Amino acid sequence: RRAAVVALVAAVGLLFWQGEAVNPWVVAAVVTGGILLVSLIDSLVGTSPSKLAIQRRHPPVVVAGRDAELTWGVRSEARRSLTVDVADQLAPSLRAGARRFRVKVPPGGSASVSTGLSPLRRGRFDIDRITVRIAGPLGLGARQREVPLHTVMRVHPPFRSAQEAELRIRRARILEVGMRSARGLGGGTDFEQLREYGPDDEFRRIDWTATARAGKPIVRTYRAERNQSVVVLLDNGRVMAGRVAGVPRVEHAMDAAMMLTAVATRLGDRCGLVAFDREVRAVVPPARHTDQVGRVTEAMYALEPVLSESDYPGAFAEVVARFRRRAMLVVLSDLLE
């Protein structure tokens, strides 16, 4: 920019030159050549970009639609103050507040610049390079180079139903400790004990053999199942590529998988995932870890619907081969006619 300003001033000066007549083309060539020569010398005597150390810092995992911060750090080994222009190769869908910046770095010092991120879509983003430009002492020329700087940002799908999952977990726990008299629909199936019939008991729970032996109505009581296995089969085929309410079907299915995993693991069961299309893409064994939702999310975040028919027999065969224990299979797909 400074070289352009110098050229503009020289052009205006020549326009109003009142001296003896000279060939304007010769004058323009001499002035232009002089400016170019000085700019070239300025860039050559300037500081090499190899004297800079560039860092890029950001969270390894960001949730789509949520704000995050990315920070660049610039450290100089030069003996003079530097004006540094930096351009980063950030994907447009990361929606960075700025991808280019200019910063002044003191001699032997460092500086940092931050910007906000609000990723639009999930996936894995490999950020490989960053471009650095250092202006010369006169500001007429600059030296520029691309610096390899590899970092990975994983953008996870949003857990839109997190509050609803938490509400269901609290409701189930309230029913467990008897703080409410309401009964959970369906009840448990694991036998607990025999006791005398009460006015609030269901007629179908009466154990007639025990009733005949005791001479009074006896009912069977059951407790909710625990330590059960749930496997979510997530369809990633072409039927899941369509949009519902502006969001791909597979995104709705991912949210359902995260909610089911959260509720099942928090209430004492194990939950896993098998993602498939024409082949199995990801497998998370059923477990009850505190970070099981994170494991399921990590397995799903980079999936993109494959525009081909899904292999349902292959997916079920994979489940049967991997998991021998009895489990409830939940298939998340789009049911066509």
Image (cartoon, rainbow, N blue to C red):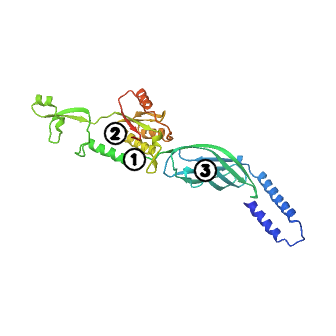
Residue at 16% in and 31% down? 207
Q: Looking at the image, do the residues carrying marks 3 and 1 touch, with CB atoms under 8 Å apart?
A: no
Left or right of 115, for residue 264? left
Residue where numbered disc 3 is placed: 72
Mark 2 vs mark 3, foreground winner is 2
| Dot label at residue 267 | 2
Mark 2 or mark 1: whose residue is earlier in sequence: 1
Circle 1: element type = helix
User: Which residue type carries mark 2?
Assistant: Leu
Circle 3: element type = strand
Left or right of 272, for residue 197? left
Q: Around disc 1, counting alpha carbons within 10 Å, would you say few (fewer than 14), some (14 to 19), or many (20 or more)?
A: some
Residue where numbered disc 1 is placed: 162
Name the image quarter holding the C terminus.
top left
Mark 2 or mark 3: whose residue is earlier in sequence: 3
Q: Around disc 3, counting alpha carbons within 10 Å, would you say few (fewer than 14), some (14 to 19), or many (20 or more)?
A: some
